[in-house]
Image: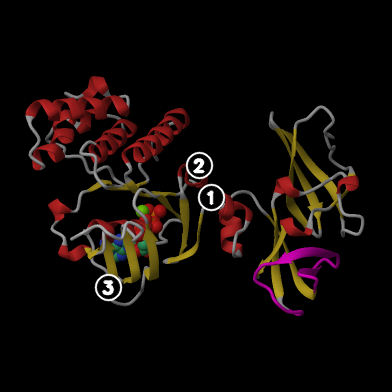
Amino acid sequence: MAQTHSNDAFVAFERVQKSYDGETLVVKDLNLSLPKGEFLTMLGPSGSGKTTCLMMLAGFETATYGEIKLDGKPINNIPPHKRGIGMVFQNYALFPHMTVAENLAFPLEVRKLGKSEREAKVKRALDMVQMGAFGGRRPAQLSGGQQQRIALARALVFEPELVLMDEPLGALDKQLREHMQFEITRIAHDLGITTVYVTHDQTEALTMSDRVAVFNDGRIQQLAPPDELYEAPQNSFVAQFIGENNTLDGTVQEIRDGYAIVKLDSGETIDCKPVNVSKPGERTLVSIRPERVEIDKSRLHPDAHTLQAEVLEFVYMGDIFRTRLRVAGREDFVIKTRNAPDQRRLKPGEMIEIGWLADDCRALDA
Ligand SMILES: Nc1ncnc2c1ncn2[C@@H]1O[C@H](COP(=O)(O)OP(=O)(O)OP(=O)(O)O)[C@@H](O)[C@H]1O
Ligand SMILES: [Mg+2]
């Protein structure tokens, strides 16, 4: 078949549903398409359906409804050895009776590569995960993090077109984890590999991905590039799941000039950007990022609404200061300020006035 439609989706989930027991849907109406070469991360709480989606894409589980396509063809019609998919499972799944080097050579043997080419590729893959000296060991003789790195090397060793990775770095310490995050994205981009990556770790998702799909309860809540996800969450779940976030409960009083005036349950009034509220009387959860709260009134719009706050706790974190406040009846309101020479170090007990740009304060679903 001629490859005329280069913009077509390389991977596509079309109205996919999955039930294991014939009663409850663990994946509900999933629509998702990836162009070739994209690095997409599925991020979401435990049990939200991420592994199930990967398993269906790899062909280990079948969709109860809908279709999954690889390069325009339904996945079920492509024989496993022609799928060209590298996979890192959540539980590593290395072959226990084979050495590390044999584990890595296996996908190359299946693809009928010659011995010298196999050896060169295995060596390169082991070096990539800093495991060059471990080729002769068996998986049982490795630590969890070492096994995880071998699983990663095995998924990449045959330079697949599509790689699926399910929490591939969960067992690694912070430094190695950050190194591997960098290596994985570098390799994926250099080789033009399309990647579907699963993680619980939002920082990992934000730093590695072209786009992130936030899962909850079997549905994609938002699919967007990292900056958009963080700065423009479409609903309360995403706002609270991604990054640190302050929330205040209230009711929309008025929508005027594109902004919502919200009356907080504690009685104060604030200005917000209406995201998924549209009329007076609607309940809303207002969301504001800690770094967007202003404590210097001179930097605010002259008629911006402000709130009184009492400083409860000041934490010095090196590059930033993290201050917890009592605001609008809540004691978990956090602000972050940059550690600059002229920055105020607030003291517990101090009363201050806080505010923000209405564009930074999002009125979301309650
Ligand atoms: N083989 C199975 N049989 C029955 N139910 C299953 C099976 N595999 C998963 N489930 C259920 O499907 C739901 C989604 O599971 P899944 O493994 O896809 O979640 P996940 O998002 O990968 O979670 P985690 O982050 O904990 O790995 C869960 O409620 C889980 O209990
Ligand atoms: Mg999982």
Q: Are marks 3 and 1 in contact (CB under 8 Å)?
A: no
Q: Nearer the viewer, residue 240 or 280?
A: 280
* Quarter of the figure with residue 139: top left
Tell me the residue that label 1 is attached to.
226
Left or right: 149 as drawn, with respect to 118: right
Residue depicted at 33% across the width and 63% down the height: 12
Do labels 2 and 1 touch, CB within 8 Å?
yes
- Report how many numbered discs are placed on residues in the image: 3
- Kindly indicate the quadrant of the structure image that contains residue 71: bottom left
Mark earlier in primary sequence (3, 1): 3
Q: Position of residue 234 (x, y in %)?
A: 59, 64
Label 2: element kind: helix
The label number, if any, that marks residue 64 in the structure image: 3
Q: Name the amino acid type tagged 3.
A: Thr
Q: Is the residue 216 above or below the residue 143 in the image?
A: below
Distance between the alpha carbons at the discs numbered 3 and 2: 33 Å
Q: Which residue is mark 2?
A: 207
In this rendering, position of residue 80 left or right of residue 129:
left
Q: Specify the segment rendered in magenta.
A: 256-281
Query: Looking at the image, is 168 positioned above or below residue 14?
Result: above
Evaluate whether residue 137 shows in this view.
Answer: no
Residue type indicated by callout 1: Pro
